[in-house]
């Protein structure tokens, strides 16, 4: 076999190897650059998502004085409005103080007292003119509301012979503050109201009525702060803060993974509490007093299963009442006769 007349020189072989190394080095540099860019994108995305969650957490827990109209419910928002809310956060105006009602046939007294939440609270009190006026119901309003939200319920209770006390949580109505912890520190306001009522009027029995966030605050007050009352009525309360945030994302057609958790984390951090530990269903395990649990069948904020989670954990006498056609916190207006019967049944436990 003939030999190659022009064998490659050592110099040309070295040049070939150098070219290969040069190509590999360029590819390595490109890969490294891609990894750096991907890392920067991941970090930027993480910071962006956390920043957005931080903003939403603040918007969710801050009641803004003299703000514009409150953001509509998720179901009422169109696609563009939902995108805008996702980018800017909700607007939660601070409920303003109003004078007590004068058209109910009962005389209301305006009260102020201090709470361990660090705020001065305002309440209205009216004594029943018939029945056992030594039976008192203290009423606690929902998220973003005030004691005026509880006037219709107060009127019914007064007519049934129960005295009533309607309380503004801190951050609402005539009480001080501009923030909310969605029932966590509001539980201290529940304790303060009960203490004030016992000192002021020495009622024979006290029942608590909490709507939505008010119900969560009542359950926490009984379970964690061991406030002593004879019975409680809980309407439309969420089973956990995380679930209620997830429900709102679901109502807006948004994914219910990661972002709700970040919102609960940052909202809690800004208000100095652990949002993941704010679980009324867990509080219910420590509740042994008679409890009426009211749930609207058409409630889009709290599911039937979530309401049942609270009911299942209650340890004492309990009644679960499902209201057909009723949404979130609208039991009395949709089913007044059923509501009156339920309250009468609970009232029997006060005797």
Image (cartoon, rainbow, N blue to C red):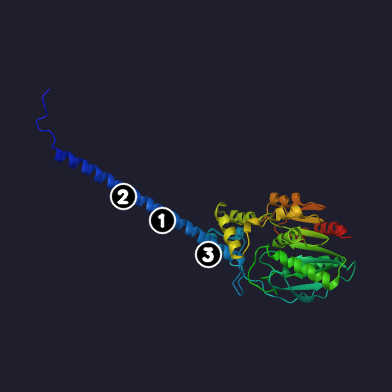
Q: Is residue 86 visible?
A: no
- Name the side, left or right, on which 213 lies relative to 82: right
Q: Earlier in the sequence, mark 2 or mark 1?
A: 2
Q: Which residue is mark 1?
A: 40
The one of 143 and 5 positioned closer to us in this rendering: 5
Pick the quarter of the image with the N terminus.
Answer: top left
What mark, if any, has residue 212 been given in the picture? none
> Mark 3 Cα within 10 Å, few/some/many (few <14, many 20+)?
few
Mark 3 or mark 1: which is in front? Answer: 1
Q: Which residue is mark 2?
A: 29
The part of the image, by quadrant, that contains residue 110 is bottom right
Q: Which residue is mark 3?
A: 88
Name above or below for residue 10 compared with residue 101: above
The one of 255 and 275 positioned closer to us in this rendering: 275
Rounded to the nearest whole Å, what is the CA distance between mark 3 and mark 1?
Answer: 24 Å
The part of the image, by quadrant, that contains residue 21 is top left
Q: Residue at x 58, y 58 (%)?
A: 265
The one of 318 and 324 positioned closer to us in this rendering: 318
The one of 247 and 202 positioned closer to us in this rendering: 202
Place of residue 175 in the rendered image (x, y in percent of width and height, measured from the top left): 70, 73
> What kind of element bears circle 1?
helix
């Amino acid at each position: 076999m003939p030999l190659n007349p022009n064998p490659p020189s050592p110099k040309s072989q070295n040049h070939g190897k150098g070219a290969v190394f040069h190509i590999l080095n360029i590819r390595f540099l490109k890969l490294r650059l891609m990894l750096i860019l991907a890392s920067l994108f991941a970090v930027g995305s993480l910071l962006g998502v956390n920043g957005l969650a931080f903003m939403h957490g603040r918007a969710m827990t801050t009641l803004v004085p003299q703000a514009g109209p409150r953001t509509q419910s998720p179901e009422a928002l169109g696609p563009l409005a939902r995108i805008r809310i996702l980018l800017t956060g909700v607007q939660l105006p601070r409920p303003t103080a109003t004078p007590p009602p004068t058209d109910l046939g009962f005389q209301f007294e305006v009260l102020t007292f201090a709470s361990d939440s660090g705020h001065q609270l305002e309440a209205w009190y009216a004594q029943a003119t018939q029945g056992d006026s030594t039976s008192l119901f203290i009423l606690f309003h929902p998220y973003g509301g005030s004691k005026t939200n509880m006037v219709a319920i107060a009127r019914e209770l007064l007519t049934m012979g129960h005295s009533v006390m309607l309380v503004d949580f801190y951050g609402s109505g005539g009480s001080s503050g501009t923030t909310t912890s969605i029932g966590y520190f509001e539980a201290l306001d529940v304790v303060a109201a009960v203490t004030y009522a016992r000192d002021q009027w020495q009622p024979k029995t006290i029942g608590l009525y909490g709507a939505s966030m008010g119900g969560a605050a009542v359950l926490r007050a009984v379970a964690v702060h061991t406030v002593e009352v004879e019975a409680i009525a809980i309407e439309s309360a969420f089973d956990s803060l995380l679930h209620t945030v997830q429900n709102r994302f679901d109502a807006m057609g948004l994914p219910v993974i990661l972002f709700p958790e970040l919102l609960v984390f940052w909202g809690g951090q800004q208000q100095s509490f652990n949002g993941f530990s704010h679980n009324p269903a867990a509080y219910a395990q420590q509740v042994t007093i008679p409890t009426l649990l009211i749930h609207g069948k058409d409630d889009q904020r709290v599911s039937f299963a979530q309401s049942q989670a609270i009911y299942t954990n209650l340890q004492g006498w309990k009644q679960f009442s499902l209201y057909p056609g009723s949404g979130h916190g609208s039991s009395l207006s949709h089913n007044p006769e059923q509501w009156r019967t339920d309250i009468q049944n609970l009232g029997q436990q006060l005797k």
